[in-house]
Amino acid sequence: MCCFSGKVDVVADTNIFARGTKDGRQFLVYSMRFKAGEDLAMILPIPTPKDSAEDAVKFINLEKYEAFFDDMNKGFPKPESDGRGPKGGGVEKNLAVIEVGKFVASFVPAIKDFARLDKQFRLPEAVWDKLPQYKDFGFAVFKLKKPEKGEQKVHPMAFDFPRDDKKIVFFPTLHIHDGSVPVKAKFDHSLFCQVAEAPSGWEESPGLADTIVKVKDTQGIVNGDGHIYRKVMKGTFENKDVGILV
């Protein structure tokens, strides 16, 4: 998902990896290139069980493995492409802020809890009124500093979370830029996953994951004994999240 609390000039080269675990949780890794004129936050809605605890999400520091997606992409033949995407109540304590490499991150258990974050890192309440499907979601929030010069490629942001529906592996791909929610959006995404069977329309890596990525450096995120599947989405698509039934 490209969901930002403020105005962004460029968002491109988005990569997302997802893998479900036997205990009903899911790993999610996210990276992109962006340009903005101010500090802002990237907000990722995630389908956590309703009323999840504030420590339900575990953030994982991949600062030392910036090449996570570079390596993953090398495991697939170069894709053909016809072009690139465009560059209320009582007083509550603030949500926990966790240092994750070059970011600080927070888990927001529900929409109402955004009031416990600094205003510059929230979306306008009217935006959520347009998105009733997220009323029971939780949110992973990463605070980003404006790039000092030009565009900035961020190191992978990673975490695992409890899934409300353990039969779905979830990718947050809905676009919200500058408070607007278009019906269709321009994607510049590569989605990766590890599931039991190849999803329809996804590429399968020729080799096992341990021949593609530095499995030890992923801190348990990638299963080295499985294949990796990839779906490249470049162009205009319906503006919604992607889910895989497993």
Image: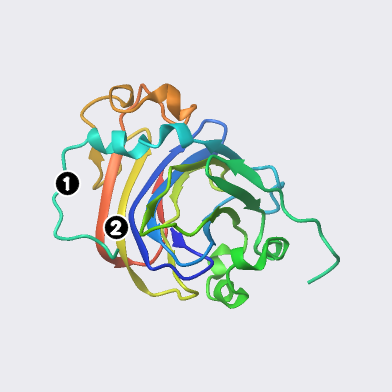
Pick the front one: 237 or 201: 237
Q: Please name the amino acid that badge 1 sits on.
A: Pro
- Image location of residue 24, percent across then percent down: 56, 37
Q: How far apart are marks 1 and 2 (CA)?
A: 13 Å
Vertical side of 178 occupied by 166: above or below: above
Image point (68%, 61%), residue name: 117
Above or below residue 69? Residue 227 is above
Quadrant (top left, top right, bottom left, bottom right) of the C terminus: top left
Q: Is residue 185 visible?
A: yes
Q: Mark 2 is on which residue type?
A: Asp
* Left or right of 206 in this view: 12: right
Q: Is mark 2 on a helix, strand or loop?
A: strand
> Where, quadrant-wise, is the N terminus in this rendering?
bottom left
Disc 1 residue crowd, few under 14, some 14–19, many 20+, Cα 10 Å: few
Q: Are marks 1 and 2 in contact (CB under 8 Å)?
A: no
Q: Name the residue under label 1.
A: 79
Image-based side of 41 in relation to 70, left or right: right
Q: Which mark is residue 188?
A: 2
- Residue 167, percent across and down? 48, 43
